[in-house]
Image (tube, helix red, strand yellow):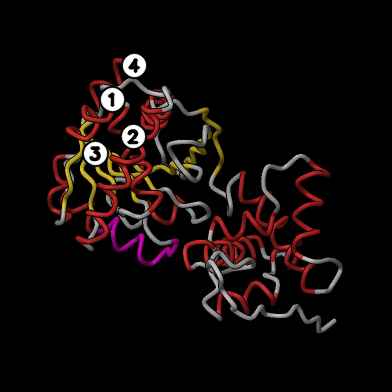
Amino acid sequence: MANDLEKAISTIGVIGAGQMGAGIAQLAATAGFSVLLHDSDSAALGRAEGIISASLRRLASKGLISQAVPDESMKRLKLASSIQELRTADLVIEAIIESEAIKKKIFIELDKILKPSAILASNTSSISITRLASATSRPSQVIGMHFMNPPPIMKLIEIVRGADTSDGVFAIIKSLSERMGKTVICSQDYPGFIVNRILMPMINEAFYTLYTGVATKEDIDTGMKLGTNHPMGPLELADFIGLDVCLSILRVLHNGLGDDKYSPCPLLVQYVDAGRLGRKRGIGVYSYQKGSNAAALKPRSSL
């Protein structure tokens, strides 16, 4: 299997220079692959390069990687301002916004420029791999690679097989993921896959608990941290993930499974409408702005 991986994959393209894309690019470069990191925003590419370099040096300073790894990894990383530069990639991992329409548009474009043997992967956390694959002429070479956030730290990867994903492609991606130091779990192509199928209803229920006035946000999170040994409370975790991402996944679950238990809490919808998206915006369920006097949206039940 290792020989199959070495023959199939030497250059990995990553689309999206946000937190997930930068983390995936860092992992791939550290694992010894040549990496092409693409984003249409040149400023985002510059930020990602700085973040990756700083992350590698921090890991080296803690003795988690050797002192030679940061420089060696950065030499393997190339910033690509044009998607055409990814045409030499053996595998492209898409890590952009959680929108099926936008992901399909990218897959259609990639399908036209990549060599016939190239594999297309999506970091989607909930969207159907089968539907994404249907936008291409190579559905047997399309697969889901759902990295956990942040990718360089979290040990898990969720591999998702579409209806037509071949056994050979699955074997290559599993081997590649293990080379990146990940523990692999495999999901069939159902909305939310494994992790978010279980996690998002818990986060949604935490919002309902806040919305109906059962407890304060602090007590909800403390209850789950100390009562169930979770490292973060569900509301803290939602802020870390991004409330807009949580809402998008819940809508995918609700639409795909047709069960009202996945219906997003009105308070979550209200926070997203207000632009309170979590840590990335400096405010979500909690405020992350020093000295902020931002008014909290008060939970108000309509029940």
Q: Which of marks 1 and 2 is nearer the N terminus?
A: 2
Looking at the rendered structure, the kind of residue marked 2 is: Leu
Please tell me how crowded label 4 is: few (under 14), some (14-19), or many (20+) other residues with Cα within 10 Å: few
Query: Is 82 above or below relative to 55?
Result: below
Per the image, the residue denoted by label 2 is 56
- Mark 2 to mark 4 CA distance (whole Å): 26 Å
Q: Which of marks 3 and 4 is nearer the N terminus?
A: 4
Mark closer to the observer (3, 4): 4
Position in image of residue 100 (x %, y %): 42, 63
Per the image, the residue denoted by label 4 is 2
Question: Is residue 46 toward the left or the right of residue 240 in the image?
Answer: left
User: Which of the 4 quarters of the picture holds residue 174?
Assistant: top left
Q: Nearer the viewer, residue 230 or 6?
A: 230
Q: Which of 237 and 95 is in front in this view?
A: 237
Query: Is 184 above or below relative to 234?
Result: above
Q: Which of marks 2 and 3 is nearer the N terminus?
A: 2
- Mark 2 to mark 3 CA distance (whole Å): 28 Å
- Mark 4 to mark 1 CA distance (whole Å): 22 Å
Judged by its main secondary structure, the magenta piece is helix
Query: Is 44 above or below relative to 227?
Result: below
Mark closer to the observer (2, 4): 2
Please tell me how crowded label 2 is: few (under 14), some (14-19), or many (20+) other residues with Cα within 10 Å: many
- Mark 3 to mark 4 CA distance (whole Å): 17 Å
Secondary structure at badge 1 equals helix
Looking at the rendered structure, the kind of residue marked 4 is: Ala
